Amino acid sequence: MRYLNTLHRFIVLFLLMGCMVSCGVSKSLKEELDISQYRTEISERVQINDTTFIIEDNFLRKNQQGLWELYVTGNPLELGLKTGHLTQELFNEQEDFFIKKIDELVPSKGYQNLLRKFLAWFNRKMYLNIDEKYKVELYGVSRYASPDYDYIAKPYQRVMYFHGAHDIGHALQDLALVGCSSFAAWGDHTDDGKLLIGRNFDFYAGDDFSKNKIIAFIKPDEGHAFMSVTWGGMIGVVSGMNDQGLTVTINAGKSQFPLVAKTPVSLVTREILQYASTIDEAIEIAKKREVFVSESIFVGSAKDKKAAIIEVSPKNFGVYEVENSNQLICANHFQSAAYSNDKKNQKHILESHSQYRYERMEELLDETQKVTPKKVVDILRDKEGLDEKKIGYGNEKALNQLLAHHGIVFKPEELLVWVSSNPYQLGEFVAYDLNEIFNTAKDPKHDVAKNDLNIAKDPFLQSKEYKNYEQYRVLRNQVQDAIADEERIEKPVLDQLIELNPNFWEAYYLAGLYNYKKGYDRLALDYFENALEKEITTVPDKKNLEKLIRKIKR
């Protein structure tokens, strides 16, 4: 499979470099943190019921929509220890899911051993690029890591490595792990003139990885209190808002595979949330951190009453703001003047699905005269292509690719946020008021959310099309495995695959690919030509399909 070959390629490249052992690796593995200034013990965790745990006045609870709500306070070590202890089972389970995904991608034990050595080498300088307070917090979390994976790395190093996994997923575009969409509207484009921001976080590492989402409410001793949508073991921020009404979300840009890890972008955005209250302050923080992949940091600000995009990469930095407009859109390509001549970015715009999603957001926002939180959710859930074209469920050209880890809506000037519940961003969007959460007493046995402001689940969940799509995903995986293993597939199975998702080019392509590999050229050609009539996700996908058709016709 394409992503498997990609991983193998980079492992082999690493071997050719002859860098499996270095002084830098040894230093990073032997790093000793000074935690003497912090109290190193916390109170024991008390279990109230199966889904509620407390440590003093901090807690973890599961709400009625299936989202875990975490509230922790304290200095960096206390934040880490409390987070790790309260979420220990979720953290260990998340690590299980992540390692299982790696095992699927790299089933060979020999390659896995090389991959472990590669991780140690690749991450050898990460510890030099992470702020000391976040290293202390990571250490606190790592105290509750599972011993089952100590063969990969010691808990502290392992937790640090996992924070770079998001960035590596962005760099390995062939893995198709990411394809996020974000937009903002304000002024006369919203119903009350106030800033609204919506985003889909389309980071996919398997269904299990998205199962236990945590809505973390963090009140550090230093800096601003903030919320973020996260998962067990993760202290970085991919989507969040602080008590000053500053929001951050991250969208992948096109990157070369980096040769050394520096600052994970989720820790840059964590620092922004904790210490910035305006767009200018966010820019200053982003400027001083060295990242190792290309990323758009979408920032919304209650104080500035607008949004801007900070575009970072290992060798460049830009800021994109709109003039004479009350909306801002971000997909997975850069827009600032700093990247106007960037050939990699230009190629990405031409060949990927990023520009298509950008134009679809433009189209939907133009059709929506006055944006409300509910209308933001409607846009995030949109499954069609440009001009309402049926492009198949699961097509990455859609805003709703039916794989999102979460969707989120911010209303910064009122400190309101809505977070989607499973599945994908189709479940109920749960509302939270940060004014109440950070400024009033909380009872972990009662709702933290403002349920009267919730946005209902998508009616699509009750449709035949949704049930067909879920069946399609299962059958697609079976067909892909059968093709890879050169097993026989009966024609009715391939016909069913197409019937379950008739507008999606991929179904026809897989049916054609099976027949092509079996030497049934006439059948393969029919399927390939049908696929070519559909909305194909990327230019490379289309070129590959056209190449197969030419081969058969010759």
Image (spheres, helix red, strand yellow):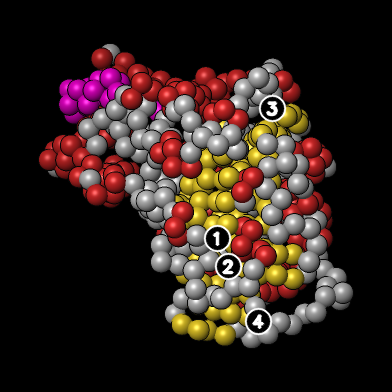
Which disc, if any, is residue 215? 1
Disc 1, disc 2: CB below 8 Å?
yes
Q: Amino acid at mark 3?
A: Tyr
Distance from the alpha carbon under mark 1 to that under mark 3: 29 Å
The mark nearer the N terminus, 1 or 3, is 1
* Mark 2 or mark 3: whose residue is earlier in sequence: 2
Q: From the image, which quarter does the N terminus lie in?
A: top left
Q: Residues within 10 Å of mark 1 (few under 14, many from 20)?
A: many
Q: Mark 3 sits on what residue?
A: 320
Q: Counting residues from the N terminus, which is met first, the one under dot 1 or under dot 2?
A: 2
Q: Secondary structure at mark 4?
A: loop
In the displayed structure image, the side of residue 426 where residue 450 appears, left or right: right
Label 4 sits on residue: 56
Magenta part mainly helix, strand or loop?
helix
- Type of amino acid under label 2: Leu
Q: How many marks?
A: 4
In percent of the image, x 68 and y 42: which residue is there?
302
Q: CA distance from mark 3 to mark 4?
A: 44 Å
Tell me if residue 518 is in the magenta stretch: no
Q: Which residues are magenta?
A: 519-537
Mark 4 and mark 2: Cα distance apart in space: 13 Å
Task: Tell me whether the residue at label 3 lies in contact with that at label 4, contact meaning CB atoms closer than 8 angstroms.
Answer: no
Closer-to-camera residue (198/370): 370
